[in-house]
Amino acid sequence: MSLRIPLTRGRVRQRLGDWGRGATTRRLSARRVRDHLAAYGLLFPALAVFTVFFYIPAVYLLYIAFFRWTILSPGTTFVGFQNFRILFEQPLFWGSLATSAYYTLVMIPATVLLALGIALLLRAGLSARRGGLWRGAVFLPHVTPVVATSIIWVWIFNPHFGLANAVLSAVHLPQLLWLESVQWALPAVMIDSLWHSLGLYVIIFLAALSTVPRDLLEVARLDGARRQQVFARIIWPLISPTTFLVVLLATVNSWQAFSQIFTMTGGPHGGAGGPAFSTTTDALLVYQTAFIYGNFSLAAAMSLILFAIVMSITVVQKWISDRLVFYR
């Protein structure tokens, strides 16, 4: 025996409301599915490029680092950690790591201090019209081709007729051999790298300085705070996240420095990394090991070590930033 509940006017409205909410939910779900499909469709070209040119080579690099693999032989032989043991026994590998570390330790503070100083000068001492002109002039080196400008810097550092020694001679300082000197070759490359990369970091600092509230600066000046105090107590804490970003970018770019060193110290047929391996960084040694000496397995092992070093430094910097960086 079935029990029938009479449909009152209230029950009819309730059922119609449930049906309407269900239809609305179904329409929203269909719209959400279409939005997701459209989003993935727009992302697919970029994901395909990253997969083909980054993710697949990265996985294959991890594979060949534990094998004896050459580009001419079709087969591979599993050797375990033998490639890493060979690297750890090579003084040139340790020397390249030391050169990369020295290059990075010099470039990070030089980049941060010079970029921040130029940004402060551009923000404080120039009008809007002249400031735009100078900002463009500062940023222009960053968008120029690295190889082309490095060739110009090779001429500038020529010890016989270069502009650098002409300037030193004009101010009565001793002339240097620059790229032909074991002592001065790497500093010459650093000067080129700073000139080329500072523009990007200056723009980043200018963007951060534009977010500093001007009323805080005015109140500090009315209270009698000096410029050093205003910078140390207000400006520096407020732009500390941007400073951390610049330090992080400078660290990664410095550890991966290749184009300037390769071009300025000889290229593929002129002994890049010289003189006497004084400018041979780890990234340059990876290239030479793979494409000049043909040992792709050792190059893959070096790449993994370089990746581990950069990742470890990044994790340490993130740990420090969580305790020192002020986030508004």
Image: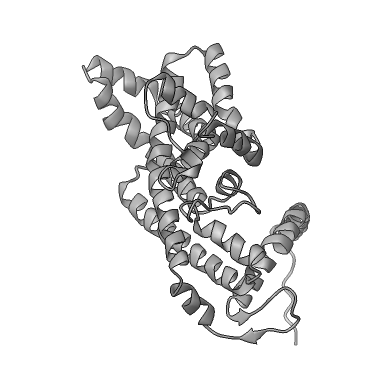
Is residue 41 in sight in this rendering?
yes
Q: Residue at x 72, y 80 (%)?
A: 3
Query: Taking 166 as reference, is 194 above or below it?
Result: below
Q: Quadrant of the N terminus?
A: bottom right
Q: Nearer the viewer, residue 139 or 320?
A: 139
Q: Percent position (x, y) of residue 239?
A: 39, 35
Q: Percent position (x, y) of residue 81?
A: 51, 82
- 44 displayed left or right of 198: right
Q: Percent position (x, y) of residue 196?
A: 55, 36
Toward which corner of the image does residue 242 lie, by quadrant?
top left
Q: Quadrant of the C terminus?
A: top left
Query: Taking 49 as reference, is 5 above or below it?
Result: below
Total numbered labels: 0
Q: Residue at x 49, y 43 (%)?
A: 180
Q: Residue at x 69, y 68 (%)?
A: 56
Q: Nearer the viewer, residue 34 or 234?
A: 234
Is residue 245 in sight in this rendering?
no
Question: Which of the colour schemes (rainbow, by chain, secondary structure, one colour) is used?
Answer: one colour
Toward which corner of the image does residue 22 lie, by quadrant?
bottom right
- 2 displayed left or right of 303: right
Q: Nearer the viewer, residue 69 or 292?
A: 292
Q: Residue at x 49, y 77 (%)?
A: 86
Q: Residue furthest front?
A: 160
